[in-house]
Image: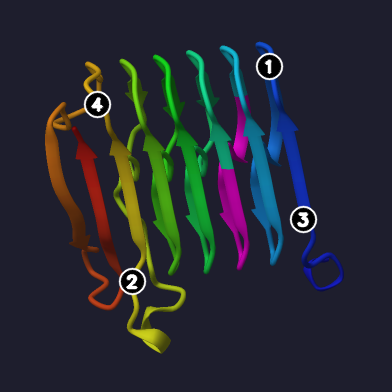
Amino acid sequence: MRGYTAGGIGALYDLAGEDAYSVGEYGQGSGYFQALGILHDAAGNDRYVGSRYAQGSAAHQAAGILVDEAGADTYLCPGPAAQGAAWDLSVAMLIDRAGDDSYSAAGLAQGSAAQLAVAMRLDLGGDDAYACPGICLGRSGDNAYHYDATGLFNFSASIDRGAGIDRYPGALSNDLLSRTGAQAQGRPAAWECCGLFLDE
C-alpha cells in the first residue's frame, strides 16, 4: 500500500484545557512514509496514550513533532517507538516546555533513532520522571538498513534542562552529560551510534 499512500500533512492544534489524547499506531504528532505529523498543545495538564509510533515519532522518510507548552503532562506508550522516536530515514521530536511530566515507553523512545534517522526529546523544566527499557533516552538503535551504502549514522538526543529533580532508570541521573553509542555485537558495519544524554 505504501506506493499509493505516500505523503501528506496532518496537524492538531489545541490552545487550552486539560486534554486526554488516545491513539493506537501513528498519531499524536506522527509521520509515516514521506508525511509530516504535528501535535501542538498550548496549555493544561494533558494525558497522551498511544500503542506504537506515537507522541512525536516518524517512520520511513517522514517527520513527526509533538510540542506541549505547559502543564504537568503524562506520556504513556506500552509499545515501541514513541516520545521522540525516528525510524528509517526519518526525523522526530518531542518538546515539552514546562511542568512536572511523566514519560513511560517500551523501547526506541524518549529521543532515540534507528536506521539512519534523527530523533530528539527535549524537556525544558519541572520535576520529571522517565521509565523505558532498552533503546531509550538518547541511545540510538540498529543502523543496518543503510550503513553499508552510506557510511552514515543515526543521531539521538535526550535533553532535560532546568533545575528540576528528575528520575531516570539505570545509571542515568541528574546533572549528567553522557555521549551514547556502541558498536553492535557481531555486526561491525551496523553501529548503535551516535547519541547524547544531557540533564542540567
Q: Is residue 6 left or right of residue 179?
A: right
Q: Which residue is mark 1?
A: 20
Q: Which residue is mark 4?
A: 169
Q: Is residue 180 above or below residue 131?
A: below
Q: Residue at x 40, y 41 (%)?
A: 121
Secondary structure at badge 1 equals strand
Residue bearing the label numbered 3: 9
Q: In the picture, which quadrant includes the C terminus?
A: top left
Q: Pinpoint residue 10: horizontal percent, then vertical percent.
A: 77, 48
Measured in 3D between alpha carbons, the distance from the residue under mark 3 to the one under mark 4, in whole angstroms, is: 35 Å
- Vertical order, 193 against 199 (above or below): below
Tell me the crowding category of disc 2: few under 14, some 14 to 19, or many 20 or more residues within 10 angstroms, Cα based.
many
Q: Amino acid at mark 4?
A: Pro
How many marks are shown on the rendered structure? Answer: 4
Give the label, 2 or 1, closer to the camera.
Answer: 1
Q: Position of residue 171 (x, y in %)?
A: 13, 31
Q: Callout 3: 10 Å neighbours few (<14), some, many (20+)?
A: some
Residue 49: which quarter of the image?
Answer: top right
Looking at the rendered structure, the secondary structure element under dot 4 is loop
Instruction: Kindly identify which residue carries mark 2.
Output: 153
For the residues labelled 4 and 1, the Cα–Cα distance comes to 26 Å
Work out whether residue 71 or residue 177 is closer to the camera in this orientation and state it.
71
| Marks 2 and 4 close (CB-CB < 8 Å) | no
Q: Which residues are magenta?
A: 49-65
For this rendering, which residue is in front, 8 or 153?
8
In three-dimensional space, the C-alpha distance between marks 1 and 3, rounded to whole angstroms, equals 22 Å
